[in-house]
Image (cartoon, helix red, strand yellow):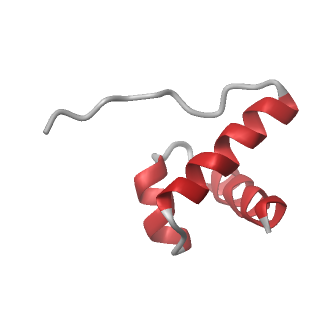
Amino acid sequence: MANHLANRILEYLDTHDETNSLYLADILQEDHQKIVGAIKSLETVHDVSLFQQQQFLS
């Protein structure tokens, strides 16, 4: 399952320049925490930085 989600994220990024995890969760209709986990898994396995962490003020 996690590998499938990681593949979906990579497929999305292949056709889009940038995004954020909240938008990906909405587009892929997945729980945000699952998206974040898949991103962290991709970064760990492939030793790359796919995303830049941002803080949103409330």
Labels in figure, total: 0
User: Quick one: which residue is furthest to the left in this view?
Assistant: 58
Vertical placement of residue 8 versus 6, above or below: below
Describe residue 50's horizontal placement relative to residue 19 as left or right.
right
Q: Quadrant of the rendered structure where residue 50 is? A: top right
Q: Position of residue 23 (x, y in %)?
A: 42, 58
Q: Position of residue 27 (x, y in %)?
A: 49, 69
Q: Nearer the viewer, residue 32 or 19?
A: 32
The quarter of the picture where the N terminus appears is bottom right
Vertical placement of residue 5 versus 13, above or below: below
Seen at 56% across and 44% down, the residue is 17
Seen at 60% across and 58% down, the residue is 34
The quarter of the picture where the C terminus appears is top left
Q: Position of residue 56 (x, y in %)?
A: 25, 35
User: Quick one: which residue is furthest to the bottom in this view?
Assistant: 29
Vertical placement of residue 46 versus 39, above or below: above
Describe residue 17's horizontal placement relative to residue 8 as left or right.
left
Q: Nearer the viewer, residue 30 or 48?
A: 30
Describe residue 27's horizontal placement relative to residue 35 as left or right.
left
Seen at 76% across and 41% down, the residue is 42
Describe residue 29's horizontal placement relative to residue 58 as left or right.
right
